[in-house]
Amino acid sequence: MVEALVGSFISAMATVLGAVPLLFVKSLSEKWKDVLIAFTAGIMVSASTFGLLPQALKESGIIPLTLGLLIGVIALDLLEKNLPHIDIEQKRGVSSFDSKSLLVIFALFIHNIPEGLSTGFSYASSNGGLGPMVAIAIGAQNMPEGLVLAIFLIHSKVSKLKLMLIVTLTGLMEVVSAIVGYFAASYIEGLIGYGLAFASGAMLFIVYKELIPETHGHGYERSATYSFIIGLLIMIYISFYFG
């Protein structure tokens, strides 16, 4: 339990780390944003493919893996359809912290719940190295998410102190949901396999629906592709080390 708490907290605070550059600069080049997001996508694909899915198969078999993965994809699909997206460009010139900003922040709170559950399920697994690996993958995804949220809030004329507080609170939602996921998987027999597959489905949906399309369209597809491969390889090495 302590390891799950520490791992989820570090993963959640990666959101804050991603926002830190915005304390010193007001923007990041499109090329660097694409490279960082693609790197994150590589890490998440690697963690899902080489970590979560094999362990889900080992824990519960092919049927729970299939059902859990599909539930993860569908759950994230419903979230994406019903919660607002961060549209940075349209926020330029906005002079107040309006209801749209509040809605986006609420959306990120909700969006972080399945990510925290993923970490909690992984720490409850019989594979002791899976929890840290998934925490690293989720943390890597949280960094560009924190950066984008910080950019959005700056364009909404939010003070830097309030910005960091908001980003921190959205990250902490992952800690709460990680604890829920850990206890649920620990005390409900047979849930771990479903939970790990759910986490994989959620990650893969984020990668293919959000992250990869975000890196293509600004003219830096080649750099983003290499960054994706590097992220995937780094996570394989991490998996080998913890596994």
Image (spheres, helix red, strand yellow):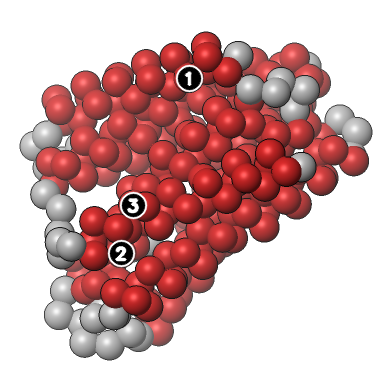
User: In the picture provided, is 128 more to the left or to the right than 13?
Assistant: right
Q: Which residue is painted at 52% across and 14% down in the image?
A: 241
Q: Secondary structure at mark 2?
A: helix
Q: Which residue is painted at 43% across and 78% down in the image?
A: 102
Q: Does the CB distance between marks 2 and 3 fall below 8 Å?
A: yes
Q: Return the residue nearer the eye: 38 or 136.
A: 136
**Residue holding disc 2:** 150
Q: Is residue 71 visible?
A: no
User: In the picture provided, is 55 more to the left or to the right than 212?
Assistant: right
Q: Which residue is painted at 60% across and 41% down in the image?
A: 7
Q: Tell me if mark 1 has few (under 14), some (14-19) or many (20+) residues whose alpha carbon lies within 10 angstroms of its own.
A: some
Which amino acid is tagged 1?
A: Ile
- Horizontal and vertical percent position of residue 78: 56, 53
Q: Say which label, 2 or 1, has the lower sequence index.
A: 2
Q: Is 73 drawn above or below residue 227 in the view shown? A: below
Which amino acid is tagged 3?
A: Gly
Q: Is 127 drawn above or below residue 97 in the view shown? A: above
Q: Quadrant of the N terminus?
A: top right
Q: CA distance from mark 2 to mark 1?
A: 29 Å
User: In the picture provided, is 94 more to the left or to the right than 4?
Assistant: left
Q: Secondary structure at mark 1?
A: helix
**Residue holding disc 1:** 238
Q: Which residue is painted at 91% across and 33% down in the image?
A: 189
- Horizontal and vertical percent position of residue 219: 8, 37
Q: Quadrant of the C terminus?
A: top right
Which image quarter: residue 54?
A: top right
Q: Secondary structure at mark 3?
A: helix
**Residue holding disc 3:** 18
